[in-house]
Image (tube, rainbow, N blue to C red):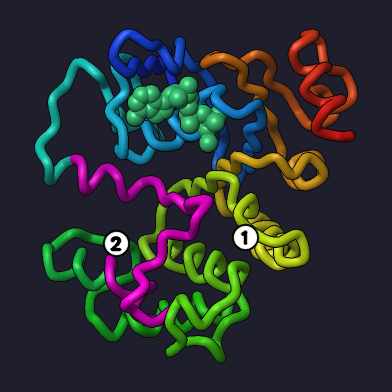
Amino acid sequence: MAFLEIKNLVKNFGATEVLKGINFSMEKGEVLAIIGSSGSGKTTLLRCLNYLETASSGEIELDGEKIFDSDVQLSEREIREKRLHFGLVFQQFNLFPQYTAFENITLAPKLALKNGIKTSGVSSAEDVERIALELLEKVGLSDKKDFYPCQLSGGQQQRVAIARALAMSPDILCFDEPTSALDPELTGEVLNVIRSLKSNDSTMIVVTHEMEFAKNVADKVIFMANGIIEEIGNPHEVFENPKSETLKAFLSKALD
Ligand SMILES: Nc1ncnc2c1ncn2[C@@H]1O[C@H](COP(=O)(O)OP(=O)(O)O)[C@@H](O)[C@H]1O
Ligand SMILES: [Mg+2]
């Protein structure tokens, strides 16, 4: 059985069907890249996985457990717990401006602790703080611990956002175009952090328009078009042997 199974996920906004039955699976430790034109439904898919949107129908199974079923109504608390399976790093970082890097990372785990929600390896505020320091080191920002977001570059802010997502020990870390708001010279440092997480066996879904990155780092690539998965395969299949005309056209533009 696969680690993650998405079955027939549909999302409507009013009369508009934005996800038209998404099916895919992934194994633990895999990196999945999602590519596709703007408006194809990539962000909506990540938001459904993270419970920021409720899918209209379909199922999500993680490690043999059904964590979403459109036929089952969940309580607020259940949603908060199930949301912890996924972490999300946004395009615009979304750090809390009034908190330091360190506080941005410790805020959610401390809140979880207070509310009796279990996160892996944490049983005290000291644990939360120790892990936050380890994560700051992992993303290369130990020296920026007490800096506020406005005192950090975009690349540094995004690395804090990655540490913040990791602090909740998600089973799967999702990235929504993590470098698209960055100046070109800052994308490398963020992509390098994501690459280093792969070598630590993190399971990740990365929506990206960095085609070289997808080609080199992903184990599996999904090409989305108009709310469906138009093609799925390993990077060689998707990038070197695209089958559909839509993917061929997309690649010739993206690789230009
Ligand atoms: N909250 C919303 N209400 C209505 N339509 C939405 C909403 N969010 C996204 N959409 C529409 O869904 C489609 C897919 O959007 P999105 O998932 O953001 O695509 P992508 O991330 O691939 O650019 C777009 O047509 C967008 O306008
Ligand atoms: Mg998007």
Which of the pair 150/53 is nearer the observer?
A: 150
Element marked by disc 1 = helix
Name the image quarter holding residue 101: bottom left
In the image, what residue occupies the spot 24% across and 19% down?
A: 70
Q: Quadrant of the C terminus?
A: top right
- All told, the count of numbered labels is 2
Residue 100's place in the image compared with 181, above or below, is below
The CA distance from mark 2 to mark 1 is: 19 Å
**Residue ID for mark 1:** 197
Ligand 1 image-quadrant field:
top left
Which of the pair 122/241 is nearer the observer?
A: 241
Residue 107 in magenta stretch: yes
Name the image quarter holding residue 21: top left
- Disc 2 marks a residue whose amino acid type is Thr
Q: Check disc 2: other Cα within 10 Å, few if <14, some if 14-19, many if 20+.
A: some
Q: Is residue 131 left or right of residue 51?
A: right
Q: Which residues are magenta?
A: 79-108
- Disc 1 marks a residue whose amino acid type is Leu
**Residue ID for mark 2:** 119
Residue 181's place in the image compared with 255, above or below, is below
Q: Position of residue 107 (x, y in %)?
A: 28, 72
